[in-house]
Amino acid sequence: MPKNSKVVKRDLDDEVIESVKDLLSNEDSSDDAFKKSELMVDDQEEKDVDVEEGSDVEDERPAWNSKLQYILAQVGFSVGLGNVWRFPYLCQKNGGGAYLVPYLILLLIIGIPLFFLELAVGQRIRRGSIGVWNYISPKLGGIGFASCVVCFFVALYYNVIIGWSLFYFSQSFQHPLPWDQCPLVKNASHTFVEPECEKSSATTYYWYREALNISSSLSESGGLNWKMTICLLAAWVMVCLAMIKGIQSSGKIMYFSSLFPYVVLLCFLIRGLLLNGSVDGIRHMFTPKLEIMLEPKVWREAATQVFFALGLGFGGVIAFSSYNKRDNNCHFDAVLVSFINFFTSVLATLVVFAVLGFKANIINEKCVTQNSEKILKLLKMGNLSQDMIPHHINFSSITAEDYNLVYDIIQKVKEEQFDSLGLKSCQIEDELDKAVQGTGLAFIAFTEAMTHFPASPFWSVMFFLMLVNLGLGSMFGTIEGIITPIVDTFKVRKEILTVICCLVAFFIGLIFVQRSGNYFVTMFDDYSATLPLLIVVILENIAVIRIYGIDKFMEDLKDMLGFSPSQYYYYMWKYVSPFVLLCLLVASIVQMGLSPPGYNAWIEDMAMEEFHSYPTWGMIVCISLMVLAILPVPIVYMVRRCNLIDDSSGSLASVSYKRGRIIKEPVNLEGDNTSLIHGKSPSEVPSPNFGKNIYRKQTGSPTLDTAPNGRYGIGYLMADMPDMPESDL
């Protein structure tokens, strides 16, 4: 046995040893030589056995403390800020309650099946995204690297949003709230309201000027915003501390970060339903517009929302499920998490429109008051006759219904001169139709509504703490999608890698806390993830169904779950999901081509947003983001195809999997091959008892293969040993 080999003694039927040479091999499944050496084992004992005492185990793969902790982690990852500020906007924009129909259909067609596929693959192979796809086909190993790149891009700007929420959270401990009123400006002669605020609103002014101190264009950097820089640093410190021990540290935090948002949403719903006008908002929200439901755009946006709501393609789902026991019921997990995600979106929609209905009612009352005063002035000036005003109307306490009655009468009588009167129609539906999403909803519309709440600082603290927790839950999964694959593949220390990753991300993220940083957030949000993730998930589907084999995968699921999954998934994975994903990819490319690439810039003088096209360098950055995200796929494919990686090195490390536990062992690949199994010379190798059925395929090549009939379909890898007596096998 070579001196640099480490001996770990175990029963052969309980261990699997795979060298990095095997993980990174460029063997093609179509190559005959690849299938010349294979050991197939029908394992007699099906129990999971812990590592024996005294074994030289250096590194055990972590595991979830409980099933609840795992479910909360998956829920925390999938339920994020998009459920609160994206889903309600899409629901309102695309037919109200009718939007739920295409959303549910697409959740069943692509959402649950693909989420189940990622859970099953991660749980079966027990590696991160890089190891999973490398295991299935080395030529498709770039899928895992592409997922890591996308996760990194998303983490860069997603944590900036958490930083914004931290800033608003820190400013909420004062009464009145700082965005309650427009600031006053004093000069030598008099005091006046800040013009930029007067032209917009107090919450809009506070967001753009006080919080972001935004510049007028992408090209105008304006230097760092020190307040947001500190908040971004705080956000990355929180993520780093939570992730530094992997799921051992982040898993415990999940109990709070995943459950607290539901407490806040329920509190907001109860409080919102007690507010005047909340029912109008909810009624407007869920009034179905069936004609809109038939438009292709609605289905495209519903499919996109389903896709991103579940976190498909990021690698976080695979990473989390890789820490499960192999007999965990991942089918139940997929259905449960998917529907929790859906009902969370509906709950958030109820909350948002209850509050927006209250806000719309306040704005509508102001509109009625202002226009009633105009009507009184017109009556005094003689421009309007008192005879046209119904006798029961009392302008000192006029209701919205009475005002609209007077408005309609004046419009009919003064049809030709009506525009010159300057009267406005005060309809609560008009205010509710103003669709807002993203930062406009969270930091402007919702904050404005909360200023009218009794005890508004308390509700503001709760709301922004909820946003921080929603963001952190998604960030944990995103960072896990980066850390786990790299640790599994390159065997680096998780603590060191986590700190380095967070430091690098913070320094790169400084571009988002410039005065022009909000425009970069928009750019990354639009271009860094959408198309690359669609391509990644399409390739994932192809890798499992075509390369690995759907029949073999269904058998693996039967072994893991203890029952055969429904044939529904067979047809979804093989036919329906790939077709829908391809249609979604084409539709997204067409939509991107038809939409002029640009951003909404805040113009200080006009106190309003104005659409600007990206400059040439901005377009280069947008294209680079998409190319860099998907570039690992063709690079790894060509490297494998052209055999550019030399796998003959004798200094590669090996990874030992013992019922899901990982052990790192240095191996001399040029030494005695039997040492890979027992660390003994051939003469010392005993005849092991494998179970019922053992047979060996044709030998004569050192090429390795996996046995398809193992306990979990993984099989056992053995080096070719032509000198070993047949009886020893």
Image: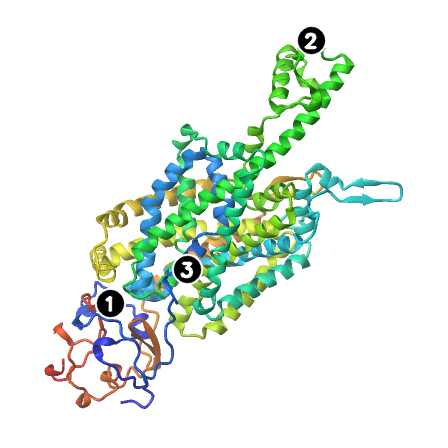
Nearest to the observer: residue 310 or residue 390: 390
Q: Earlier in the sequence, mark 2 or mark 1?
A: 2
Percent x, y of residue 144: 38, 62
Q: CA distance from mark 1 to mark 3?
A: 22 Å
Amino acid on which the number 1 mark rests in the picture? Ile
- Location of mark 3 (residue): 316
Label 1 packing within 10 angstroms: few (<14), some (14-19), many (20+) = some
Q: Earlier in the sequence, mark 1 or mark 3?
A: 3
Label 3 packing within 10 angstroms: few (<14), some (14-19), many (20+) = many
At 42% from the left edge and 55% from the top edge, which residue is drawn? 75
Q: Quadrant of the C terminus?
A: bottom left
SS label for mark 1: loop
Percent x, y of residue 470: 51, 54
Whether residue 290 is situated above or below residue 679 in the rendered picture: above
Dividing the picture into quadrants, the one containing residue 105 is top left
Label 2 packing within 10 angstroms: few (<14), some (14-19), many (20+) = few
- Location of mark 2 (residue): 387
Whether residue 701 is situated above or below residue 424 in the rendered picture: below
Amino acid on which the number 3 mark rests in the picture? Gly
Label placed on residue 464: none
- Location of mark 1 (residue): 714
Q: CA distance from mark 3 to mark 2?
A: 70 Å
Image-based side of 376 in relation to 279, left or right: right
Amino acid on which the number 2 mark rests in the picture? Asp
Residue furthest out toward the left: 727
Dividing the picture into quadrants, the one containing residue 444 is top right
At 16% from the left edge and 72% from the top edge, which residue is drawn? 44
Tags 2 and 1 touching, CB below 8 Å: no
